[in-house]
Image (cartoon, rainbow, N blue to C red):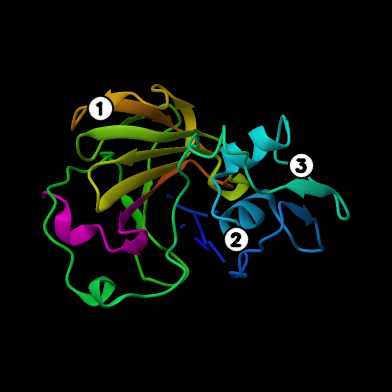
């Protein structure tokens, strides 16, 4: 799926991910005027904000924005440290990003058939089929970093941060069963499969290492 890019789509996790727009330099201004082609996600990413934080700064109840609308894109000192992580995408590659990712042990987040594998291009993760309402499990233990629908093409999106390097994203859920800040155990049911943000019932699962989507297959237990 095009993402994320999360998230272009990650991503997190499109727009994780995740149809995302190209990157743009971060402005020093605290205000930004919405232009043709902008989405709330692309504006947030380009100003180093999460979608939830951008919504909070501008008192937005949803992701709808209008061309010519002026948005606040810099939090005040009192709110600068309060944010909800979104699917991160590093602006520039670093030497460390070219090193092999260290091992992480994952379980399959769903028992359904694989509809599409990771290809690093049009699909930044694995698409898994199943019936609406099928259980979705945490691939590894961690903390819920995001639970919401701020990235339209990902539908109801859940992001779990496992450690400083890894996070996993679960998109198109029918229902999310956990909330931001919850500590999650590997194998715990965290959502129900659905078709939000998609034209079919499926789970779009991504694994990200230092913000970059990587193929989850080598890390998934058979």
Q: Is residue 184 magenta?
A: no
- Residue at the image position 23 percent from the left and 40 percent from the top: 139
- Residue at the image position 45 percent from the left and 51 percent from the top: 87
List the residue tagged with mark 1: 184
Question: Dot 1: within a 10 Å radius of its alpha carbon, few (fewer than 14), some, or many (20 or more) residues?
Answer: many
**Nearest to the observer: residue 72 or residue 107:** 72
Question: Dot 3: within a 10 Å radius of its alpha carbon, few (fewer than 14), some, or many (20 or more) residues?
Answer: few
**Circle number at residue 77:** none
Hey, which quadrant is residue 126 in on the image?
Answer: bottom left
> Can residue 19 be seen here?
no
C-alpha separation, residue under disc 1 versus residue under disc 3: 31 Å
**Nearest to the observer: residue 25 or residue 10:** 25
Mark 2 lies on a secondary structure that is helix
- Badge 1 or badge 2: first in the primary sequence: 2
Q: Is residue 134 left or right of residue 147?
A: left
Q: Position of residue 43 (x, y in %)?
A: 66, 55
Mark 1 lies on a secondary structure that is strand
Q: Is residue 89 left or right of residue 57?
A: left
C-alpha separation, residue under disc 3 versus residue under disc 2: 17 Å
Q: Is residue 136 left or right of residue 199?
A: left
**Nearest to the observer: residue 53 or residue 77:** 77
User: From the viewer's perspective, is the residue at label 3 or at label 2 nearer?
Assistant: 2
- Residue at the image position 63 percent from the left and 57 percent from the top: 42
List the residue tagged with mark 3: 64
Question: Dot 2: within a 10 Å radius of its alpha carbon, few (fewer than 14), some, or many (20 or more) residues?
Answer: some
C-alpha separation, residue under disc 1 versus residue under disc 2: 30 Å
**Nearest to the observer: residue 185 or residue 134:** 185
**Circle number at residue 46:** 2
User: From the viewer's perspective, is the residue at label 1 or at label 2 nearer?
Assistant: 2
Q: Which residues are magenta?
A: 206-222
């Amino acid at each position: 799926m095009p993402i994320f890019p999360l998230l272009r789509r990650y991503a997190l996790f499109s727009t994780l991910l995740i149809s995302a727009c190209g990157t743009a330099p971060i402005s020093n201004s605290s205000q930004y005027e919405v232009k043709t082609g902008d989405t709330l996600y692309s504006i947030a990413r380009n100003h180093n904000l999460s979608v939830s934080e951008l919504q909070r700064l501008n008192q937005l109840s949803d992701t709808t924005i209008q061309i010519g609308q002026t948005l606040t894109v810099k939090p005040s000192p009192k709110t600068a440290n309060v944010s909800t992580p979104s699917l991160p995408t590093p602006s520039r590659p670093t030497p460390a990003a070219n090193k092999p990712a260290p091992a992480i042990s994952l379980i399959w987040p769903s028992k359904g058939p694989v509809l599409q594998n990771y290809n690093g291009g049009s699909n930044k993760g694995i698409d898994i089929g199943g019936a609406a309402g099928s259980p979705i499990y945490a691939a590894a233990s961690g903390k819920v970093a995001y639970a919401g629908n701020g990235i339209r093409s990902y539908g109801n999106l859940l992001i779990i941060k496992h450690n400083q390097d890894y996070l996993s994203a679960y998109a198109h859920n029918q229902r999310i069963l956990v909330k931001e800040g919850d500590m999650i155990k590997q194998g715990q049911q965290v959502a129900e499969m659905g078709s939000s943000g998609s034209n079919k019932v499926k789970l779009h699962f991504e694994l990200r290492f230092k913000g970059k989507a990587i193929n989850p297959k080598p890390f998934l237990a058979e």
